[in-house]
Image (cartoon, grey):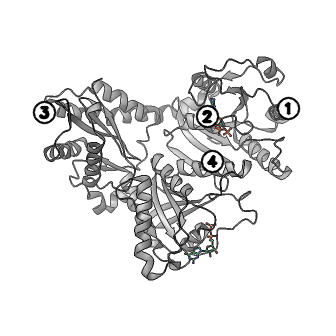
Amino acid sequence: MRLFRVFSKIFTVSLIGRPNVGKSTLFNNIVGERSSLVHPTPGLTRDRIEAVTNLFGVPIKIIDTAGWDPVGTKNSPNMIEKMMSQTRKALFESDMAFFLLDVRQGVTIADEKLAEYLRKEGVKDYPNLKEIVLVGNKAEQSYLGDISNEVYSLGMGDPIMISAEHNEGIVDLYEKLRDAIPETYFEENKEKHEKRLQRHAKVKAEKYKELKALETTTGENFNLKEWERAYDEINPPENSDYDTDSEINIDNSIADPIAYKKNPEVLRKVKGIQLSIIGRPNVGKSTLINSLLGEERVITDPEAGTTRDSIYIDYVYSGRKIKLVDTAGLYKRSKGAVGKMIEDDVKKAIKFSHVVIMMFDAFEGVTPMELDLARDVIDEGRVLLLVGNKWDKVAKDMKTKFSDYYADLFYRKITLKGLNIAMISASQKYNTRKMLSEIIDLYDRWNLRVSTGLLNRWLDSFKKVQSMPTEDGELLKIKYITQIKSRPPTFYVYVNDRSLMKENYLKNFTNSLCKEFNISGVPIRILLRDKH
Ligand code: GDP
Ligand code: GDP
Protein backbone atom coordinates (compact mmCIF):
# COMPACT_ATOMS: atom_id res chain seq x y z
CA MET A 1 0.00 0.00 0.00
CA ARG A 2 1.28 3.42 -0.85
CA LEU A 3 1.22 5.94 1.95
CA PHE A 4 2.24 8.99 0.04
CA ARG A 5 2.11 10.29 -3.38
CA VAL A 6 4.30 13.34 -3.63
CA PHE A 7 2.46 14.90 -6.50
CA SER A 8 -0.30 13.76 -8.68
CA LYS A 9 0.42 14.17 -12.33
CA ILE A 10 -1.27 13.35 -15.56
CA PHE A 11 0.17 10.49 -17.58
CA THR A 12 1.87 12.26 -20.46
CA VAL A 13 2.75 11.04 -23.91
CA SER A 14 4.62 13.02 -26.51
CA LEU A 15 4.67 12.54 -30.25
CA ILE A 16 8.14 13.11 -31.63
CA GLY A 17 9.89 12.73 -34.96
CA ARG A 18 10.88 14.88 -37.87
CA PRO A 19 8.36 17.14 -39.63
CA ASN A 20 5.79 15.57 -41.96
CA VAL A 21 5.84 12.07 -40.56
CA GLY A 22 2.24 12.56 -39.43
CA LYS A 23 2.46 13.65 -35.80
CA SER A 24 -0.34 16.18 -36.08
CA THR A 25 -2.50 13.71 -37.92
CA LEU A 26 -1.99 11.15 -35.15
CA PHE A 27 -2.58 13.81 -32.52
CA ASN A 28 -5.91 14.75 -34.09
CA ASN A 29 -6.81 11.12 -34.44
CA ILE A 30 -6.27 10.49 -30.73
CA VAL A 31 -7.62 13.75 -29.43
CA GLY A 32 -10.23 14.43 -32.09
CA GLU A 33 -13.19 16.40 -30.95
CA ARG A 34 -13.48 14.28 -27.89
CA SER A 35 -11.04 15.88 -25.55
CA SER A 36 -12.56 17.91 -22.81
CA LEU A 37 -9.62 20.11 -22.13
CA VAL A 38 -7.57 21.33 -24.99
CA HIS A 39 -5.33 24.29 -25.04
CA PRO A 40 -2.40 25.61 -26.92
CA THR A 41 0.55 26.00 -24.60
CA PRO A 42 1.17 29.60 -23.62
CA GLY A 43 3.70 31.18 -25.86
CA LEU A 44 4.36 28.02 -27.75
CA THR A 45 1.49 27.30 -30.09
CA ARG A 46 3.75 27.49 -33.06
CA ASP A 47 5.93 24.74 -31.80
CA ARG A 48 3.75 22.47 -29.86
CA ILE A 49 0.24 21.81 -28.83
CA GLU A 50 -1.16 19.65 -26.11
CA ALA A 51 -4.46 18.22 -25.05
CA VAL A 52 -5.84 16.18 -22.22
CA THR A 53 -8.14 13.43 -23.31
CA ASN A 54 -9.72 10.52 -21.51
CA LEU A 55 -8.59 7.10 -22.59
CA PHE A 56 -9.44 3.91 -20.71
CA GLY A 57 -10.90 6.09 -17.96
CA VAL A 58 -7.62 7.86 -17.33
CA PRO A 59 -6.83 11.42 -18.31
CA ILE A 60 -3.87 11.39 -20.64
CA LYS A 61 -1.95 14.38 -21.82
CA ILE A 62 -0.80 14.20 -25.42
CA ILE A 63 1.87 16.59 -26.62
CA ASP A 64 2.37 17.19 -30.31
CA THR A 65 5.78 18.64 -31.14
CA ALA A 66 6.62 20.68 -34.23
CA GLY A 67 9.19 18.11 -35.21
CA TRP A 68 12.91 18.09 -35.37
CA ASP A 69 14.91 18.25 -38.55
CA PRO A 70 18.68 18.54 -38.09
CA VAL A 71 19.41 18.13 -41.79
CA GLY A 72 16.71 20.24 -43.39
CA THR A 73 18.50 22.64 -45.71
CA LYS A 74 16.16 25.49 -45.00
CA ASN A 75 16.75 25.39 -41.29
CA SER A 76 19.29 27.64 -39.65
CA PRO A 77 21.25 26.23 -36.68
CA ASN A 78 19.20 28.56 -34.53
CA MET A 79 15.98 27.06 -35.82
CA ILE A 80 17.24 23.50 -35.38
CA GLU A 81 18.16 24.23 -31.79
CA LYS A 82 14.75 25.76 -31.18
CA MET A 83 12.99 22.73 -32.60
CA MET A 84 15.15 20.31 -30.69
CA SER A 85 14.61 22.16 -27.47
CA GLN A 86 10.86 21.79 -28.00
CA THR A 87 11.27 18.06 -28.37
CA ARG A 88 13.43 17.97 -25.23
CA LYS A 89 10.91 19.97 -23.24
CA ALA A 90 8.14 17.65 -24.32
CA LEU A 91 10.18 14.58 -23.40
CA PHE A 92 11.03 16.08 -20.05
CA GLU A 93 7.35 16.10 -19.13
CA SER A 94 6.55 12.75 -20.65
CA ASP A 95 6.09 9.27 -19.27
CA MET A 96 6.12 7.81 -22.71
CA ALA A 97 6.94 8.88 -26.25
CA PHE A 98 5.86 7.72 -29.66
CA PHE A 99 8.69 8.20 -32.11
CA LEU A 100 7.10 8.45 -35.54
CA LEU A 101 8.64 7.41 -38.84
CA ASP A 102 7.26 7.78 -42.33
CA VAL A 103 7.50 4.23 -43.69
CA ARG A 104 7.10 5.49 -47.23
CA GLN A 105 10.29 7.48 -46.94
CA GLY A 106 12.06 4.84 -44.93
CA VAL A 107 14.58 5.66 -42.23
CA THR A 108 16.26 8.99 -42.97
CA ILE A 109 19.40 10.57 -41.57
CA ALA A 110 17.23 12.80 -39.43
CA ASP A 111 15.51 9.74 -37.95
CA GLU A 112 18.89 8.15 -37.26
CA LYS A 113 20.15 11.26 -35.54
CA LEU A 114 17.13 11.48 -33.30
CA ALA A 115 17.39 7.78 -32.46
CA GLU A 116 21.06 8.21 -31.66
CA TYR A 117 20.31 11.11 -29.37
CA LEU A 118 17.57 9.18 -27.61
CA ARG A 119 19.73 6.10 -27.21
CA LYS A 120 22.61 8.08 -25.77
CA GLU A 121 20.85 10.53 -23.51
CA GLY A 122 17.19 9.78 -23.85
CA VAL A 123 15.88 7.85 -20.96
CA LYS A 124 18.50 8.88 -18.46
CA ASP A 125 18.06 12.58 -19.17
CA TYR A 126 14.35 12.50 -18.59
CA PRO A 127 13.08 11.61 -15.15
CA ASN A 128 9.67 10.23 -16.06
CA LEU A 129 10.28 8.83 -19.48
CA LYS A 130 9.88 5.08 -19.20
CA GLU A 131 9.40 4.03 -22.75
CA ILE A 132 9.95 5.22 -26.29
CA VAL A 133 7.91 3.33 -28.83
CA LEU A 134 8.76 3.39 -32.49
CA VAL A 135 5.76 3.96 -34.75
CA GLY A 136 5.81 3.42 -38.51
CA ASN A 137 3.19 5.74 -39.92
CA LYS A 138 1.59 5.90 -43.38
CA ALA A 139 1.49 2.11 -43.47
CA GLU A 140 -2.09 1.81 -44.68
CA GLN A 141 -3.18 -1.30 -46.49
CA SER A 142 -2.05 -0.06 -49.88
CA TYR A 143 1.52 0.23 -48.59
CA LEU A 144 3.55 -2.78 -49.62
CA GLY A 145 7.07 -1.81 -48.61
CA ASP A 146 9.13 -3.31 -45.86
CA ILE A 147 11.44 -1.27 -43.68
CA SER A 148 12.28 -3.89 -41.10
CA ASN A 149 15.98 -3.91 -42.07
CA GLU A 150 16.35 -0.15 -41.95
CA VAL A 151 14.50 0.08 -38.69
CA TYR A 152 16.81 -2.43 -37.13
CA SER A 153 19.68 0.06 -37.41
CA LEU A 154 17.85 2.45 -35.12
CA GLY A 155 18.17 -0.01 -32.27
CA MET A 156 14.77 0.83 -30.88
CA GLY A 157 12.89 -2.38 -31.43
CA ASP A 158 10.10 -3.21 -33.83
CA PRO A 159 7.78 -0.40 -34.83
CA ILE A 160 4.03 -0.50 -34.46
CA MET A 161 2.70 -0.05 -37.96
CA ILE A 162 -0.16 2.39 -38.28
CA SER A 163 -1.92 4.77 -40.59
CA ALA A 164 -2.89 7.85 -38.65
CA GLU A 165 -4.81 9.20 -41.58
CA HIS A 166 -6.77 6.05 -42.37
CA ASN A 167 -7.20 5.03 -38.78
CA GLU A 168 -5.44 1.69 -39.10
CA GLY A 169 -3.37 0.03 -36.41
CA ILE A 170 -4.33 2.66 -33.86
CA VAL A 171 -5.74 -0.04 -31.62
CA ASP A 172 -2.26 -1.60 -31.32
CA LEU A 173 -0.91 1.76 -30.36
CA TYR A 174 -3.58 2.17 -27.69
CA GLU A 175 -2.77 -1.27 -26.38
CA LYS A 176 0.86 -0.34 -26.00
CA LEU A 177 -0.17 2.86 -24.27
CA ARG A 178 -2.52 1.10 -21.94
CA ASP A 179 0.19 -1.35 -20.92
CA ALA A 180 2.50 1.53 -20.06
CA ILE A 181 0.08 3.25 -17.70
CA PRO A 182 0.76 2.26 -14.08
CA GLU A 183 -2.10 0.64 -12.22
CA THR A 184 -2.24 3.55 -9.75
CA TYR A 185 -3.54 5.86 -12.45
CA PHE A 186 -6.48 3.55 -13.03
CA GLU A 187 -7.14 3.29 -9.30
CA GLU A 188 -6.99 7.02 -8.78
CA ASN A 189 -9.41 7.68 -11.57
CA LYS A 190 -11.70 4.78 -10.97
CA GLU A 191 -14.29 6.72 -9.03
CA LYS A 192 -14.29 9.63 -11.45
CA HIS A 193 -14.48 7.29 -14.37
CA GLU A 194 -17.42 5.42 -12.92
CA LYS A 195 -19.16 8.70 -12.16
CA ARG A 196 -18.60 9.80 -15.71
CA LEU A 197 -20.09 6.59 -17.05
CA GLN A 198 -23.05 6.90 -14.68
CA ARG A 199 -23.62 10.50 -15.68
CA HIS A 200 -23.47 9.55 -19.32
CA ALA A 201 -25.95 6.72 -18.78
CA LYS A 202 -28.27 9.02 -16.84
CA VAL A 203 -28.34 11.82 -19.42
CA LYS A 204 -28.76 9.29 -22.17
CA ALA A 205 -31.57 7.50 -20.34
CA GLU A 206 -33.40 10.80 -19.86
CA LYS A 207 -33.16 11.57 -23.55
CA TYR A 208 -34.22 8.04 -24.38
CA LYS A 209 -37.27 8.38 -22.18
CA GLU A 210 -38.26 11.63 -23.89
CA LEU A 211 -37.93 10.02 -27.28
CA LYS A 212 -39.76 6.88 -26.25
CA ALA A 213 -42.68 8.96 -24.98
CA LEU A 214 -42.74 10.89 -28.21
CA GLU A 215 -42.64 7.66 -30.19
CA THR A 216 -45.69 6.44 -28.34
CA THR A 217 -47.69 9.65 -28.84
CA THR A 218 -46.93 9.80 -32.54
CA GLY A 219 -47.30 6.08 -33.14
CA GLU A 220 -44.16 6.16 -35.26
CA ASN A 221 -41.14 3.91 -35.22
CA PHE A 222 -38.15 6.04 -34.27
CA ASN A 223 -35.45 3.39 -34.57
CA LEU A 224 -34.08 4.23 -31.15
CA LYS A 225 -31.43 1.52 -31.39
CA GLU A 226 -29.80 3.53 -34.16
CA TRP A 227 -30.18 6.69 -32.10
CA GLU A 228 -28.47 5.04 -29.13
CA ARG A 229 -25.55 3.97 -31.27
CA ALA A 230 -25.20 7.48 -32.71
CA TYR A 231 -25.46 8.98 -29.27
CA ASP A 232 -22.58 6.91 -27.94
CA GLU A 233 -20.51 7.58 -30.98
CA ILE A 234 -20.98 11.31 -30.80
CA ASN A 235 -20.67 11.50 -27.02
CA PRO A 236 -18.17 8.76 -26.14
CA PRO A 237 -18.97 7.77 -22.54
CA GLU A 238 -15.29 7.78 -21.60
CA ASN A 239 -14.86 11.31 -22.71
CA SER A 240 -18.19 12.79 -21.82
CA ASP A 241 -17.62 16.20 -20.38
CA TYR A 242 -20.79 16.16 -18.37
CA ASP A 243 -18.70 16.97 -15.35
CA THR A 244 -18.00 20.36 -16.83
CA ASP A 245 -20.76 22.87 -16.47
CA SER A 246 -20.07 24.57 -19.71
CA GLU A 247 -23.40 23.87 -21.27
CA ILE A 248 -26.44 26.01 -21.05
CA ASN A 249 -29.52 23.90 -20.81
CA ILE A 250 -32.82 24.93 -22.12
CA ASP A 251 -35.20 22.39 -20.79
CA ASN A 252 -38.82 22.25 -19.92
CA SER A 253 -38.21 23.86 -16.58
CA ILE A 254 -37.25 27.00 -18.42
CA ALA A 255 -39.92 26.84 -21.06
CA ASP A 256 -38.73 29.93 -22.84
CA PRO A 257 -36.22 29.44 -25.65
CA ILE A 258 -34.43 32.65 -24.87
CA ALA A 259 -34.59 32.26 -21.13
CA TYR A 260 -30.88 31.86 -20.87
CA LYS A 261 -30.53 35.47 -21.88
CA LYS A 262 -32.59 36.55 -18.94
CA ASN A 263 -30.87 34.24 -16.56
CA PRO A 264 -27.42 35.54 -15.78
CA GLU A 265 -26.99 32.84 -13.14
CA VAL A 266 -26.92 30.25 -15.86
CA LEU A 267 -24.47 32.31 -17.80
CA ARG A 268 -22.00 32.80 -15.03
CA LYS A 269 -21.49 29.09 -14.82
CA VAL A 270 -20.02 28.98 -18.28
CA LYS A 271 -16.29 28.45 -18.34
CA GLY A 272 -13.65 30.56 -20.06
CA ILE A 273 -14.08 31.34 -23.70
CA GLN A 274 -11.03 30.42 -25.68
CA LEU A 275 -10.60 33.12 -28.27
CA SER A 276 -8.01 33.44 -30.95
CA ILE A 277 -7.44 36.23 -33.39
CA ILE A 278 -6.27 35.34 -36.85
CA GLY A 279 -5.52 37.53 -39.81
CA ARG A 280 -2.79 38.73 -42.11
CA PRO A 281 0.15 40.67 -40.69
CA ASN A 282 -0.55 44.33 -40.06
CA VAL A 283 -4.32 44.09 -39.94
CA GLY A 284 -4.13 45.21 -36.31
CA LYS A 285 -4.28 42.05 -34.17
CA SER A 286 -1.71 43.23 -31.62
CA THR A 287 -3.27 46.66 -31.51
CA LEU A 288 -6.63 45.13 -30.66
CA ILE A 289 -5.20 43.02 -27.86
CA ASN A 290 -3.32 45.97 -26.47
CA SER A 291 -6.35 48.17 -26.60
CA LEU A 292 -8.41 45.55 -24.78
CA LEU A 293 -5.81 45.17 -22.11
CA GLY A 294 -5.09 48.85 -21.93
CA GLU A 295 -1.37 48.32 -21.85
CA GLU A 296 1.44 47.35 -24.15
CA ARG A 297 1.64 43.70 -23.34
CA VAL A 298 1.96 42.08 -26.66
CA ILE A 299 5.55 42.35 -27.66
CA THR A 300 6.23 42.17 -31.34
CA ASP A 301 9.18 40.09 -32.30
CA PRO A 302 11.57 41.78 -34.74
CA GLU A 303 11.87 38.51 -36.61
CA ALA A 304 8.15 38.42 -37.25
CA GLY A 305 7.12 35.45 -39.29
CA THR A 306 9.90 33.20 -38.18
CA THR A 307 10.09 33.15 -34.44
CA ARG A 308 7.09 34.95 -33.09
CA ASP A 309 5.38 32.89 -30.49
CA SER A 310 1.78 33.01 -29.51
CA ILE A 311 0.58 34.80 -26.48
CA TYR A 312 -1.95 33.63 -24.02
CA ILE A 313 -3.85 36.08 -21.86
CA ASP A 314 -6.76 35.81 -19.46
CA TYR A 315 -9.20 38.63 -19.80
CA VAL A 316 -12.44 39.32 -17.99
CA TYR A 317 -15.25 41.13 -19.72
CA SER A 318 -18.64 41.71 -18.16
CA GLY A 319 -18.12 38.92 -15.68
CA ARG A 320 -17.02 36.43 -18.30
CA LYS A 321 -13.60 34.96 -18.63
CA ILE A 322 -12.01 35.17 -22.04
CA LYS A 323 -8.70 33.50 -22.83
CA LEU A 324 -7.08 35.49 -25.54
CA VAL A 325 -4.62 33.76 -27.79
CA ASP A 326 -2.73 35.86 -30.27
CA THR A 327 -1.62 33.41 -32.89
CA ALA A 328 1.50 33.66 -34.95
CA GLY A 329 -0.66 35.33 -37.53
CA LEU A 330 -1.41 34.38 -41.02
CA TYR A 331 1.51 34.89 -43.30
CA LYS A 332 1.56 34.55 -47.02
CA ARG A 333 1.55 31.05 -48.41
CA SER A 334 4.53 29.32 -49.99
CA LYS A 335 7.30 30.67 -47.88
CA GLY A 336 9.00 27.32 -47.55
CA ALA A 337 8.92 25.32 -44.38
CA VAL A 338 8.30 28.25 -42.11
CA GLY A 339 5.38 29.47 -44.17
CA LYS A 340 3.76 26.07 -44.00
CA MET A 341 4.33 25.74 -40.31
CA ILE A 342 2.62 29.01 -39.62
CA GLU A 343 -0.27 28.07 -41.81
CA ASP A 344 -0.62 24.81 -39.88
CA ASP A 345 -0.50 26.88 -36.78
CA VAL A 346 -3.46 28.95 -37.80
CA LYS A 347 -5.34 25.75 -38.54
CA LYS A 348 -4.48 24.49 -35.09
CA ALA A 349 -5.51 27.76 -33.50
CA ILE A 350 -8.89 27.37 -35.17
CA LYS A 351 -9.26 23.80 -34.02
CA PHE A 352 -8.47 24.60 -30.44
CA SER A 353 -10.47 27.77 -30.04
CA HIS A 354 -14.09 28.21 -29.19
CA VAL A 355 -14.35 31.55 -30.93
CA VAL A 356 -12.16 32.80 -33.73
CA ILE A 357 -11.89 36.45 -34.69
CA MET A 358 -10.92 36.61 -38.32
CA MET A 359 -9.60 40.13 -38.63
CA PHE A 360 -9.21 41.92 -41.93
CA ASP A 361 -8.27 45.40 -42.97
CA ALA A 362 -11.58 47.05 -43.83
CA PHE A 363 -9.81 49.85 -45.65
CA GLU A 364 -7.60 47.65 -47.82
CA GLY A 365 -9.98 44.80 -48.51
CA VAL A 366 -10.11 41.03 -48.33
CA THR A 367 -8.06 38.42 -50.17
CA PRO A 368 -9.38 35.00 -51.30
CA MET A 369 -7.15 33.41 -48.69
CA GLU A 370 -8.96 35.28 -45.94
CA LEU A 371 -12.29 34.11 -47.31
CA ASP A 372 -11.03 30.51 -47.30
CA LEU A 373 -9.88 30.88 -43.76
CA ALA A 374 -13.21 32.23 -42.57
CA ARG A 375 -14.82 29.24 -44.23
CA ASP A 376 -12.40 26.88 -42.42
CA VAL A 377 -13.54 28.28 -39.09
CA ILE A 378 -17.16 27.42 -39.83
CA ASP A 379 -16.27 24.03 -41.31
CA GLU A 380 -14.45 23.20 -38.10
CA GLY A 381 -17.64 24.01 -36.22
CA ARG A 382 -16.19 26.98 -34.40
CA VAL A 383 -17.76 30.35 -33.72
CA LEU A 384 -16.64 32.91 -36.25
CA LEU A 385 -16.66 36.63 -35.77
CA LEU A 386 -15.53 38.62 -38.75
CA VAL A 387 -13.89 41.84 -37.70
CA GLY A 388 -13.12 44.62 -40.15
CA ASN A 389 -10.47 46.80 -38.55
CA LYS A 390 -9.23 50.32 -39.34
CA TRP A 391 -12.81 51.47 -39.84
CA ASP A 392 -11.59 54.95 -38.97
CA LYS A 393 -9.80 55.06 -42.31
CA VAL A 394 -12.98 54.50 -44.28
CA ALA A 395 -14.63 57.78 -45.21
CA LYS A 396 -17.94 58.45 -43.53
CA ASP A 397 -20.01 58.51 -46.69
CA MET A 398 -18.47 55.21 -47.84
CA LYS A 399 -19.13 53.24 -44.67
CA THR A 400 -22.54 51.83 -45.61
CA LYS A 401 -21.28 50.85 -49.03
CA PHE A 402 -18.25 49.13 -47.55
CA SER A 403 -20.13 47.20 -44.92
CA ASP A 404 -22.71 46.00 -47.43
CA TYR A 405 -19.91 44.91 -49.70
CA TYR A 406 -18.18 42.88 -46.99
CA ALA A 407 -21.42 41.35 -45.77
CA ASP A 408 -22.18 40.18 -49.30
CA LEU A 409 -18.64 38.94 -49.95
CA PHE A 410 -18.45 36.78 -46.84
CA TYR A 411 -22.01 35.56 -47.12
CA ARG A 412 -21.36 34.27 -50.63
CA LYS A 413 -18.47 32.23 -49.32
CA ILE A 414 -19.99 31.02 -46.09
CA THR A 415 -23.77 31.17 -46.56
CA LEU A 416 -24.50 31.17 -42.89
CA LYS A 417 -27.62 33.03 -41.78
CA GLY A 418 -26.90 35.65 -39.18
CA LEU A 419 -23.21 35.82 -40.01
CA ASN A 420 -21.82 38.80 -38.20
CA ILE A 421 -19.26 41.36 -39.16
CA ALA A 422 -18.11 43.89 -36.61
CA MET A 423 -16.50 47.02 -37.96
CA ILE A 424 -14.03 48.35 -35.45
CA SER A 425 -11.09 50.56 -34.98
CA ALA A 426 -8.63 48.88 -32.69
CA SER A 427 -6.43 51.94 -32.33
CA GLN A 428 -9.36 54.26 -31.61
CA LYS A 429 -11.14 51.68 -29.49
CA TYR A 430 -14.23 52.13 -31.59
CA ASN A 431 -16.76 49.27 -31.26
CA THR A 432 -14.30 46.99 -29.47
CA ARG A 433 -16.55 46.50 -26.44
CA LYS A 434 -19.53 45.86 -28.63
CA MET A 435 -17.44 43.27 -30.39
CA LEU A 436 -16.81 41.49 -27.09
CA SER A 437 -20.52 41.43 -26.31
CA GLU A 438 -21.07 39.93 -29.71
CA ILE A 439 -18.51 37.22 -28.98
CA ILE A 440 -20.20 36.29 -25.74
CA ASP A 441 -23.58 36.21 -27.38
CA LEU A 442 -22.37 33.95 -30.19
CA TYR A 443 -20.52 31.70 -27.76
CA ASP A 444 -23.67 31.22 -25.71
CA ARG A 445 -25.61 30.26 -28.79
CA TRP A 446 -22.96 27.74 -29.66
CA ASN A 447 -23.32 26.16 -26.20
CA LEU A 448 -27.04 25.94 -26.29
CA ARG A 449 -28.93 22.75 -25.52
CA VAL A 450 -32.58 22.45 -26.35
CA SER A 451 -34.80 19.75 -24.91
CA THR A 452 -36.35 17.15 -27.17
CA GLY A 453 -39.81 18.29 -26.12
CA LEU A 454 -39.29 21.86 -27.25
CA LEU A 455 -37.65 20.78 -30.46
CA ASN A 456 -40.49 18.53 -31.48
CA ARG A 457 -43.12 21.09 -30.62
CA TRP A 458 -41.30 23.39 -33.00
CA LEU A 459 -41.09 20.58 -35.57
CA ASP A 460 -44.86 20.09 -35.43
CA SER A 461 -45.52 23.72 -36.17
CA PHE A 462 -42.86 23.76 -38.87
CA LYS A 463 -44.44 20.80 -40.61
CA LYS A 464 -47.79 22.56 -40.56
CA VAL A 465 -46.58 25.59 -42.46
CA GLN A 466 -44.04 23.94 -44.74
CA SER A 467 -45.42 21.38 -47.14
CA MET A 468 -43.24 18.31 -47.47
CA PRO A 469 -41.31 17.69 -50.65
CA THR A 470 -42.31 14.64 -52.64
CA GLU A 471 -40.67 12.49 -55.25
CA ASP A 472 -42.80 10.28 -57.49
CA GLY A 473 -45.57 10.70 -55.01
CA GLU A 474 -43.42 9.64 -52.09
CA LEU A 475 -43.67 11.96 -49.15
CA LEU A 476 -40.80 12.98 -46.92
CA LYS A 477 -41.66 12.36 -43.31
CA ILE A 478 -39.66 13.90 -40.53
CA LYS A 479 -40.24 11.69 -37.54
CA TYR A 480 -38.36 13.49 -34.86
CA ILE A 481 -35.53 15.80 -34.02
CA THR A 482 -33.26 15.67 -31.01
CA GLN A 483 -30.11 17.49 -30.05
CA ILE A 484 -27.28 15.08 -29.65
CA LYS A 485 -24.46 17.46 -28.81
CA SER A 486 -23.60 21.12 -28.36
CA ARG A 487 -20.50 23.15 -29.32
CA PRO A 488 -21.51 23.23 -32.15
CA PRO A 489 -25.22 22.49 -31.72
CA THR A 490 -25.71 19.15 -33.44
CA PHE A 491 -29.12 17.75 -34.25
CA TYR A 492 -30.19 14.30 -35.15
CA VAL A 493 -33.14 14.29 -37.50
CA TYR A 494 -34.84 11.01 -38.19
CA VAL A 495 -36.73 10.80 -41.50
CA ASN A 496 -38.38 8.06 -43.52
CA ASP A 497 -36.04 8.47 -46.49
CA ARG A 498 -33.10 10.85 -46.66
CA SER A 499 -33.14 11.02 -50.44
CA LEU A 500 -36.48 12.83 -50.27
CA MET A 501 -34.91 15.71 -48.37
CA LYS A 502 -34.26 18.43 -50.87
CA GLU A 503 -31.58 21.02 -50.41
CA ASN A 504 -33.97 23.93 -50.35
CA TYR A 505 -36.22 22.30 -47.85
CA LEU A 506 -33.30 21.51 -45.59
CA LYS A 507 -32.22 25.11 -45.83
CA ASN A 508 -35.64 26.34 -44.74
CA PHE A 509 -35.69 23.74 -42.01
CA THR A 510 -32.30 24.82 -40.69
CA ASN A 511 -33.07 28.52 -40.88
CA SER A 512 -36.34 28.11 -39.10
CA LEU A 513 -34.74 25.98 -36.40
CA CYS A 514 -31.99 28.56 -35.86
CA LYS A 515 -34.46 31.37 -35.71
CA GLU A 516 -36.73 29.63 -33.23
CA PHE A 517 -33.97 28.77 -30.81
CA ASN A 518 -31.82 31.80 -31.36
CA ILE A 519 -28.80 29.99 -32.75
CA SER A 520 -28.29 32.00 -35.92
CA GLY A 521 -24.78 33.10 -36.72
CA VAL A 522 -23.06 29.98 -35.40
CA PRO A 523 -22.32 26.75 -37.23
CA ILE A 524 -24.77 23.97 -36.56
CA ARG A 525 -24.86 20.40 -37.74
CA ILE A 526 -27.85 18.45 -38.91
CA LEU A 527 -27.41 14.69 -39.08
CA LEU A 528 -30.08 13.08 -41.19
CA ARG A 529 -30.88 9.47 -40.46
CA ASP A 530 -33.39 7.16 -42.04
CA LYS A 531 -34.62 3.60 -41.89
CA HIS A 532 -32.01 2.25 -44.30
P1 GDP B 1 3.76 16.36 -38.81
O1 GDP B 1 4.55 17.46 -39.44
O2 GDP B 1 4.63 15.25 -38.33
O3 GDP B 1 2.80 16.84 -37.77
O4 GDP B 1 2.91 15.69 -40.01
P2 GDP B 1 1.40 15.91 -40.44
O5 GDP B 1 0.48 15.26 -39.49
O6 GDP B 1 1.20 17.35 -40.74
O7 GDP B 1 1.37 15.03 -41.79
C1 GDP B 1 2.23 15.30 -42.87
C2 GDP B 1 1.60 14.78 -44.13
O8 GDP B 1 1.50 13.36 -44.10
C3 GDP B 1 0.20 15.30 -44.36
O9 GDP B 1 0.06 15.61 -45.72
C4 GDP B 1 -0.68 14.12 -44.00
O10 GDP B 1 -1.89 14.14 -44.72
C5 GDP B 1 0.18 12.94 -44.36
N1 GDP B 1 -0.13 11.75 -43.55
C6 GDP B 1 -0.28 11.70 -42.20
N2 GDP B 1 -0.60 10.45 -41.81
C7 GDP B 1 -0.66 9.70 -42.93
C8 GDP B 1 -0.96 8.32 -43.17
O11 GDP B 1 -1.28 7.53 -42.27
N3 GDP B 1 -0.90 7.91 -44.46
C9 GDP B 1 -0.57 8.75 -45.50
N4 GDP B 1 -0.52 8.26 -46.72
N5 GDP B 1 -0.32 10.05 -45.29
C10 GDP B 1 -0.35 10.53 -44.03
P1 GDP C 1 -0.74 42.79 -36.52
O1 GDP C 1 0.44 42.44 -37.36
O2 GDP C 1 -2.00 42.20 -37.10
O3 GDP C 1 -0.59 42.45 -35.08
O4 GDP C 1 -0.94 44.37 -36.66
P2 GDP C 1 -0.53 45.56 -35.67
O5 GDP C 1 -1.41 45.56 -34.47
O6 GDP C 1 0.93 45.51 -35.42
O7 GDP C 1 -0.94 46.82 -36.53
C1 GDP C 1 -0.35 47.12 -37.79
C2 GDP C 1 -0.44 48.61 -38.09
O8 GDP C 1 -1.80 49.02 -38.22
C3 GDP C 1 0.14 49.47 -36.97
O9 GDP C 1 0.85 50.53 -37.55
C4 GDP C 1 -1.09 49.99 -36.24
O10 GDP C 1 -0.84 51.22 -35.61
C5 GDP C 1 -2.10 50.12 -37.35
N1 GDP C 1 -3.47 50.00 -36.85
C6 GDP C 1 -3.96 49.03 -36.04
N2 GDP C 1 -5.27 49.23 -35.80
C7 GDP C 1 -5.64 50.35 -36.47
C8 GDP C 1 -6.87 51.08 -36.60
O11 GDP C 1 -7.91 50.73 -36.05
N3 GDP C 1 -6.84 52.18 -37.39
C9 GDP C 1 -5.70 52.59 -38.03
N4 GDP C 1 -5.80 53.70 -38.77
N5 GDP C 1 -4.53 51.94 -37.91
C10 GDP C 1 -4.48 50.84 -37.15
The disc placed on residue 116 is 1
Given the image, on which type of amino acid does mark 3 rest? Answer: Thr
Q: Nearer the viewer, mark 2 or mark 4?
A: 4
Real-space CA distance between mark 3 and mark 4, rounded to the nearest whole angstrom: 51 Å
Q: Position of residue 405 (x, y in %)?
A: 43, 67
Instruction: Tell me, yes or no, whether the two marked residues, 3 and 4, touch with CB atoms within 8 Å.
Output: no
Q: Residues within 10 Å of mark 4 (few under 14, many from 20)?
A: some
Q: Secondary structure at mark 2?
A: helix
Measured in 3D between alpha carbons, the distance from the residue under mark 1 to the one under mark 3, in whole angstroms, is 69 Å
Horizontal and vertical percent position of residue 446: 39, 52
Provide residue 481's location: percent of width, then percent of height: 26, 39
Q: Which residue is mark 2?
A: 26
Residue drawn at (42%, 43%) of the image: 243
Q: Amino acid at mark 2?
A: Leu
Distance between the Cα atoms at labels 3 and 2? 46 Å
Q: Could you tell me which quadrant the N terminus lies in?
A: top right
**Residue under the image location 69 percent in, 27 percent down:** 135
User: Sequence-wise, which precedes: disc 3 or disc 4?
Assistant: 3
* Residue depicted at 39% across the width and 30% down the height: 232
Q: Quadrant of ligand 1?
A: top right
Amino acid at the residue labelled 1:
Glu
Residue position marked by numbered label 3 in the rendering? 217
Q: Nearer the viewer, mark 2 or mark 1?
A: 2
Q: Secondary structure at mark 3?
A: helix
**Which is nearer the N-term, disc 3 or disc 2?**
2
- Mark 2 neighbour density, 10 Å: few (under 14) some (14–19) many (20 or more): many
Which quarter of the rendered picture does the C terminus lie within? top left
Q: What x and y, as percent, mark residue 11?
A: 62, 36
| Mark 4 residue CB less than 8 A from any atom of ligand 1 | yes
Badge 2 residue CB within 8 Å of ligand 1: yes
